[in-house]
Amino acid sequence: MSLRSALAPLRQAVRVTPRRAFGSSASRQSESLFVHRDTDYNNPNIKFEFTPENLKEAQKIIDRYPPQYKKAACMPILDLGQRQNGGWTSISVMNAVAKLLEMPKMRVYEVATFYTMYNREPVATNFVQLCTTTPCQLGGCGSTKILETIESHLNVHPGQTTKDGKFTLIEVECLGACSNAPMMQINDDFYEDLTPETTIQVLQALSKGERPKPGPQSGRRTSENSAGLTTLTGPPPKPGQFNLPEFQ
């Protein structure tokens, strides 16, 4: 009997059911993130100009910095261009920012490809960013359950857009609302303390063109203790009523 055959029962005995990895976003080739390739919807020949209103806003941002350092306004003005461009940063947006700030185009490209808040591809009207970092994995019902709910309800996986063009779903790292986990960010709004039921309610409302109330979906306010107040439950003492220890 060969060694391979002898070890076959052992391999069968220790075989375990595969578990979902913590980081399971759809893999994306580096080209799609860092290298521009002209397409019919993203090429330098597509004209982009800031609207008069956004030009005024851009100038307000530029005025925050000394004239010789106006290139420091690159990030907020890229965000301004992305918002005007329907939620994503095309090559034409980057070129317009470079022209406005009088800086080399490559410097703008470097910023836009480094920071993940700049979307290099078009996204839907509702850009769903689900946090699947450890606190959200462990909080409440867990982000894995929320991810499964979103995938089932929208019939998409991370990195995909629904056929009706209303939702784009991605997984992201910590969004800073760990005490209200699990949570997701949709456009500029946070939806926290999610359950499968409240997640579907939020998605259904957005699908109708409504804007669900952001914040915790459990009824609590901001990040207060979900079990209720445990400190500061009475009126504060009046001046002079503090009993402070005397120090020798």
Image (cartoon, grey):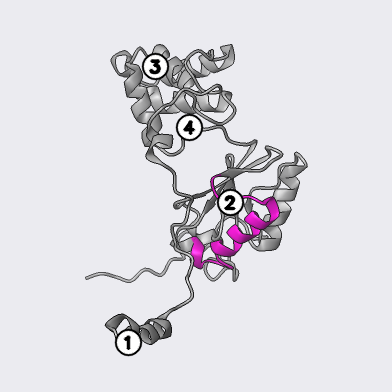
Q: Secondary structure at mark 1?
A: helix
Q: For residue 9, which quarter of the picture?
A: bottom left
Which residue is tagged 4? 120
The image quadrant that residue 183 belongs to is bottom right
**Residues shaded magenta:** 136-159
Give the overall secondary structure of the magenta segment. Answer: helix
3D distance between C-alphas at marks 4 and 1: 52 Å
- Do the CB atoms of the residues marked 2 and 3 lie less than 8 Å apart? no
**Is 71 left, or right, of 192 in this rendering?**
left
Closer to the camera, 13 or 146? 13
N-term-proximal mark, 3 vs 1 = 1
Q: Alpha carbon of mark 2 to alpha carbon of mark 4: how far?
A: 18 Å
Q: Residues within 10 Å of mark 2 (few under 14, many from 20)?
A: some
One can see residue 235 in this view:
no
Seen at 32% across and 87% down, the residue is: 6
Residue 108 at x, y = what percent?
37, 23
| Residue assigned mark 2 | 157
Closer to the chain start, of discs 1 and 2, is 1
Q: Please check the rendered image and state whether residue 21 is part of the magenta-colored stretch, yes or no.
A: no
Judge the density around disc 4: few (<14), some (14-19), many (≥20) Cα neighbours within 10 Å.
many
Amino acid at circle 2: His
Extreme residue toward the front, this view: 1
Report, in whole angstroms, how far the alpha carbon at label 3 lies from the one at label 4.
Answer: 16 Å
Mark 1 packing: few (<14 Cα in 10 Å), some, or many (20+)?
A: few
Q: Amino acid at mark 4?
A: Arg
